[in-house]
Image: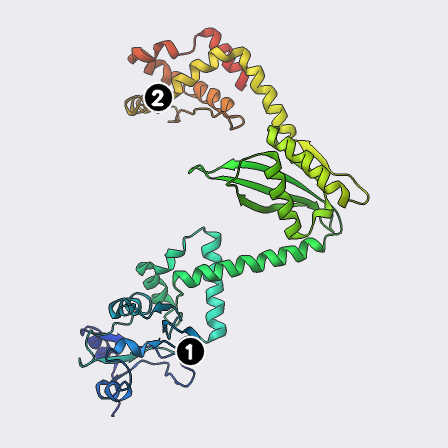
Amino acid sequence: MDEQTFNSQEINEFYQEDFINVNFDYSTSQTFDTQSEITDTNSSVTSSTSSLPSSLVWEHFDKNPPHASGYNVCKTCSIKYKLSTGISTLRKHLKDYHQVQVPARSNRRQKTIIGVKPFDEREHAEHTTYLIQWLICDLQPFTTVDDPYFRAFVKHFCPRYIIPERHQVKELIITTFNDQRANLIRQLHQIEGQFSLTADMWTSMNRDAFLGITIHYIDSNWCLCNFLLDIIPFTTRHTGENIASEIKRVLDEFNISGKIIALTTDNESAMVVCGRRLAVSLDSQLSLMTFSHYRCTAHVLNLGVKQGLELVGDSINKVRELMSRIKNSTTLCDQLRSFCNLKNIPNYKPILDVETRWNSTYYMLRRVEQLKMALVLLVADNDNIKSLYPNEDDWIIIKVIWC
């Protein structure tokens, strides 16, 4: 079979033809040129695939190989499909993940483009490491690597790199997590001092509960260090016994139970019980010190402030209702924006305090003071919120709180 070498113009014309098959053979026995070559392989395909199934898809898949019995395995990325998988699915995989378009019939005349030489194993692993770091640090979903626009973007700047598909990415991220966890355990064992913990229960927006555990210690340079030790999905009851059991499990997993001298939590009753349970469990493992449970000073102070605000609760409730009415009304928000522009003050949005968010009441009252000139005009135009506007006594209380 004669080979022909085309110039760049002929190659561009060739790319315009239908049923172009971009075929990358990554076997070590194949030697690639750094420049693209185009060969007519119609006759060679017939002779080389006579013992294989008729579809040209099988040039890119190993059917039922010994190392993956019961599967069709992609030669490029090693993804596995069951033997019952249809040819169209395998063809779609080649097109979506490897930019290889295989004609539907084997007797159709096809052309093969041998592209630039792909990265070797070391270079490919190095590029994949940067990809995995970006996916993890930017909180990207696994499916990002399957997005055709993302794949086209990477292929444009680095055509030699083969992007792994989402199942491979998932395995790589799990492997990276396990490696980092093992490395963290080794580093903690090298710390000569003791550790303290902070723990808190929190709930996500979709109402899933988690237990967060943070570790604190002083390193060899006398620098205070801390980081998130673990975050645990909590599907059982939030009792002190269950929380203590999960914390103890994590400590045993990191093999640092004998070096924990303190736990700081909020004043929630379950956390108080948790502290007692851990004290009983950990005191026996500490040779020179005793385990202590501390209640967060900032949390105690916040509880005192909230109790003090009950003395002026009527004024705060009035402001809270006013902010709520404005935030929930598109009309009122638009009018407030117009009055802010009229008074030449920043277009601040109303703030509504939250029970579990510290200082949110302070920020709400400060925002009312900032919007005071615009609120006067807004209340004058809307009778339904006039009763909610602070009177002189309310303004005195507001100013005392936020100043």
Camera-side residue: 49 or 190?
49
For label 1, the residue is 66
User: What amino acid type should be assigned to the residue bearing mark 1?
Assistant: Pro
Image location of residue 180, percent across then percent down? 58, 57
Tell me which colouring the rendered structure shows: rainbow
Q: Earlier in the sequence, mark 1 or mark 2?
A: 1
Image location of residue 58, percent across then percent down? 30, 77
User: What amino acid type should be assigned to the residue bearing mark 2?
Assistant: Ile
Res 244 → quadrant:
top right
Q: Quadrant of the C terminus?
A: top right
The residue shown at (39%, 23%) is: 345
For label 2, the residue is 326
Camera-side residue: 146 or 283?
283
* Distance (Cα) linking label 1 and label 2: 69 Å
The residue shown at (50%, 13%) is: 313
Q: Secondary structure at mark 2?
A: helix
Compared to 256, does 201 lie above or below? above
Compared to 355, does 182 lie above or below? below
Q: Is residue 182 left or right of residue 59?
A: right
